[in-house]
C-alpha cells in the first residue's frame, strides 16, 4: 500500500524507486507485444526526447495563451501539421481549416458534437446519427450533452450504409459521423457517399479519424487502396485525429479540425457573468499543462514526414504477417479485411475465444477481446504499430500453440447457478455487494487482468445495459482509497 501523504517527506530516489516498482506490474508498453492502449514506433531516443520536451513546458498553463505564447505557437503548429496531412491548408479545397488541441479522442468527439449542437439553438432536441461501429465516445458525448443518439446498423461489410444513414437524418439531426477507420474492425466507412448525403440535407459531417487518421494518409501513399476520407471530400466539415496514436506522441494529445472558423466557433465556451476573469475556453479543460503539447511537437518534428512514411511501411508489413498467420491457423479466421492497421480475428465454434486470449497472454501477446454485439460474434482485436514489425514473425507459431492449448482446455464452464442468477439481473439490481459476490465467484482478486476468460464469458452473455452496469461495478470495486 502506498501512502501518498506521509507524515515526513520521502527522499526523491526512494519515491522514484517505488514508482518503478509499481510500473513493473503493468503490461509492456514497448516491445511489440501489446495490441491495445499504447503505440510504439520502436524509435531509439524518442521517449527521452518527448520526456525532455514535456519537462520544458510541464508548468505552462494553456488557460491564457496571451500569458504563455509559447503554447499558442505550439498548438498552432500541431493544428497546421494535422490540417495539411488531412487535406486542408493553403492551395487546397479547404484553405481555411482551423483546429484545437485536446486531451484525447473522446474530448475531440465531445467537442465536435457540442459545436454541431450549439450551432442550432433553435432545435430543442438535437440528434446525432452514427453507424453501429462508431466509437463509444459518441455515445458518451450524446449522454453528456443531452443529444439524442440514432445508431444505424452497418452493412455485411462492417461499413456504414449510406442509404440507411441518410434515411436516419431528420429535421433535428445536427451531426452525422462515421469512422476512418472504425476502431473495432479497422475498416474505413464510405466517407464520400456519407458526406454527400449529409451535405444534401444541410447537416454537418464529422470524420472520426482519431484512431488511424495519422497513418491512413501514409498507407495511401504506400499504395493501399483506401478511399478518400479527409477535407478533399466535399461535405466533410470536421475531422478528429489523435496524435498519441499513430503520430506516436505521449498521452494525451488529439486534434479536432474544422473546415473553417465559423464551424468551430460554437465549440468555444465563454462566460463573463461573474466577478472574476472572463472564462473563454476552446476545449473542455480550462487549465491545461503544456507538457503533452510540447512533447507532441517534439515528436512530430523529430520524426518528420519521411519518418512517418517509414513507420507506416513497418506497420503495413506487420499487418500482412499477422493476417497471414491467422489465415494459416486452423480454428481462427480473419473477421474483417486487414486494410489499415488492425487485425481482427474470430474463432471457430470449437475454440473458446476468451480462453484463446488468455492463452495468448500467457505467451506474452496481450490482445483486446471484443464482446459479441447484435449479430456480430465476439472477436479479438489487434492494434498493430510499427514496433510489431520486429515481433510479427513470432506470432504465428504462438497463435497455433495457443489454439491447440485452448482446444485442450475446452470452453469456460460458468456455474449454472451463476448463469441463472445473471440471467435474472437487471442493471438496477447491480450493487457493490452483488459485485463483491460475483468477483469472488469468478476468482477475481489481486491478480485481476491475468485470467479474464470467465469474466469475459459472463459479460458476453449479458445484454449491453447489464454489461455496462457490471463493468462499472467492477471498476468501482477496484477504485477504492488505499487507507
Image (spheres, helix red, strand yellow):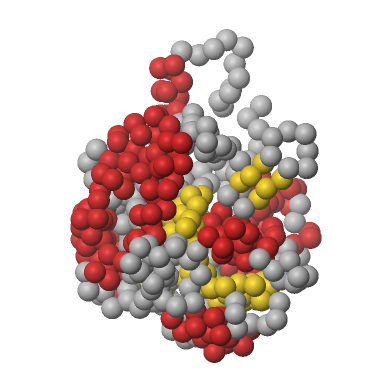
* Residue 326 visible in the current orientation: no
Pick the residue in front: 116 or 219. 116
In the displayed image of the protein, which residue is found farthest to the top?
8
| Residue pictured at 78% horizontal, 59% vertical | 429
Quarter of image, res 110: bottom right
Q: Please identify the quadrant where the C terminus is shown.
A: top right
| Residue pictured at 35% horizontal, 69% vertical | 92
Give the image location of residue 476, x and y in percent: 66, 46
**Tag count in the figure?**
0
- Up the image or down, 14 lies above or below 139; here it is above
- Up the image or down, 172 lies above or below 102; here it is below
Give the image location of residue 389, x and y in percent: 23, 57
Pick the residue in front: 413 or 424. 424
Quarter of image, res 74: top left
| Residue pictured at 68% horizontal, 73% vertical | 127
| Residue pictured at 40% horizontal, 34% vertical | 54
* Residue 339 visible in the current orientation: yes
Pick the residue in front: 302 or 62. 62
Give the image location of residue 183, x and y in percent: 45, 66
In the image, 374: left or right of 89? right
Give the image location of residue 350, x and y in percent: 42, 76
Q: Please identify the quadrant where the N terminus is shown.
A: top right
Quarter of image, res 288: top right
Amino acid at each position: 500500500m502506498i501512502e501518498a501523504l506521509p507524515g515526513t517527506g520521502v527522499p526523491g530516489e526512494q519515491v522514484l524507486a517505488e514508482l518503478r516498482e509499481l510500473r513493473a506490474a503493468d503490461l509492456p508498453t514497448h516491445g511489440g507485444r501489446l495490441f491495445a492502449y499504447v503505440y510504439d514506433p520502436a524509435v531509439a531516443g524518442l521517449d527521452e526526447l518527448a520526456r525532455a520536451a514535456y519537462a520544458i513546458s510541464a508548468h505552462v498553463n494553456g488557460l491564457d495563451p496571451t500569458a504563455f505564447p509559447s503554447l499558442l505557437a505550439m498548438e498552432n503548429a500541431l493544428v497546421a501539421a494535422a490540417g495539411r496531412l488531412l487535406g486542408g491548408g493553403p492551395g487546397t479545397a479547404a484553405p481555411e481549416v482551423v483546429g484545437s488541441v485536446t486531451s484525447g479522442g473522446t474530448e475531440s468527439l465531445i467537442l465536435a458534437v457540442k459545436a454541431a449542437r450549439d450551432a442550432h439553438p433553435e432545435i430543442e432536441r438535437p440528434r446525432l446519427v452514427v453507424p453501429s461501429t462508431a466509437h463509444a465516445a459518441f455515445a458518451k458525448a450524446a449522454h453528456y450533452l443531452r443529444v439524442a443518439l440514432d445508431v444505424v446498423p452497418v452493412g455485411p461489410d462492417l461499413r456504414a450504409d449510406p442509404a440507411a444513414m441518410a434515411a436516419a437524418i431528420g429535421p433535428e439531426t445536427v451531426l452525422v459521423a462515421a469512422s476512418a477507420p472504425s476502431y473495432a474492425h479497422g475498416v474505413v466507412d464510405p466517407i464520400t457517399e456519407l458526406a454527400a448525403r449529409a451535405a444534401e440535407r444541410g447537416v454537418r459531417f464529422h470524420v472520426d479519424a482519431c484512431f488511424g487518421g495519422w497513418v491512413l494518409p501514409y498507407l495511401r501513399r504506400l499504395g493501399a487502396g483506401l478511399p478518400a476520407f479527409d477535407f478533399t471530400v466535399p461535405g466533410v466539415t470536421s475531422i478528429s485525429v489523435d496524435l498519441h496514436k499513430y503520430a506516436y506522441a505521449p498521452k494525451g494529445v488529439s486534434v479536432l479540425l474544422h473546415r473553417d472558423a465559423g464551424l468551430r466557433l460554437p465549440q468555444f465556451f465563454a462566460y463573463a457573468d461573474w466577478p472574476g476573469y472572463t472564462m473563454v475556453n476552446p476545449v473542455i479543460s480550462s487549465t491545461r499543462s503544456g507538457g503533452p503539447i510540447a512533447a507532441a511537437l517534439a515528436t512530430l518534428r523529430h520524426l518528420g514526414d519521411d519518418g512517418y512514411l517509414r513507420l507506416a511501411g513497418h506497420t503495413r508489413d506487420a499487418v500482412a504477417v499477422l493476417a497471414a498467420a491467422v489465415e494459416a491457423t486452423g480454428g481462427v479466421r480473419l473477421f474483417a479485411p486487414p486494410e489499415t492497421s488492425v487485425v481482427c480475428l474470430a474463432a471457430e465454434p470449437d475454440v473458446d475465444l476468451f480462453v484463446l486470449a488468455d492463452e495468448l497472454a500467457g505467451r506474452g501477446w496481450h490482445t483486446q477481446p471484443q464482446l459479441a454485439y447484435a449479430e456480430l460474434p465476439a472477436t479479438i482485436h489487434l492494434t498493430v504499430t510499427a514496433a510489431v514489425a520486429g515481433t510479427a514473425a513470432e506470432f504465428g507459431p504462438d497463435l497455433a500453440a495457443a489454439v491447440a492449448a485452448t482446444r485442450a482446455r475446452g470452453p469456460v464452464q460458468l456455474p449454472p447457478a451463476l448463469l441463472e442468477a445473471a440471467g435474472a439481473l437487471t442493471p438496477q439490481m447491480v450493487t457493490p455487494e452483488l459485485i463483491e459476490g460475483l468477483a469472488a465467484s469468478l476468482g477475481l482478486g489481486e491478480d485481476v487482468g491475468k485470467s479474464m476468460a470467465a469474466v469475459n464469458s459472463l459479460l458476453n452473455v449479458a445484454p449491453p445495459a447489464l454489461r455496462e452496469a457490471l463493468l462499472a461495478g467492477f471498476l468501482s470495486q477496484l477504485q477504492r482509497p488505499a487507507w
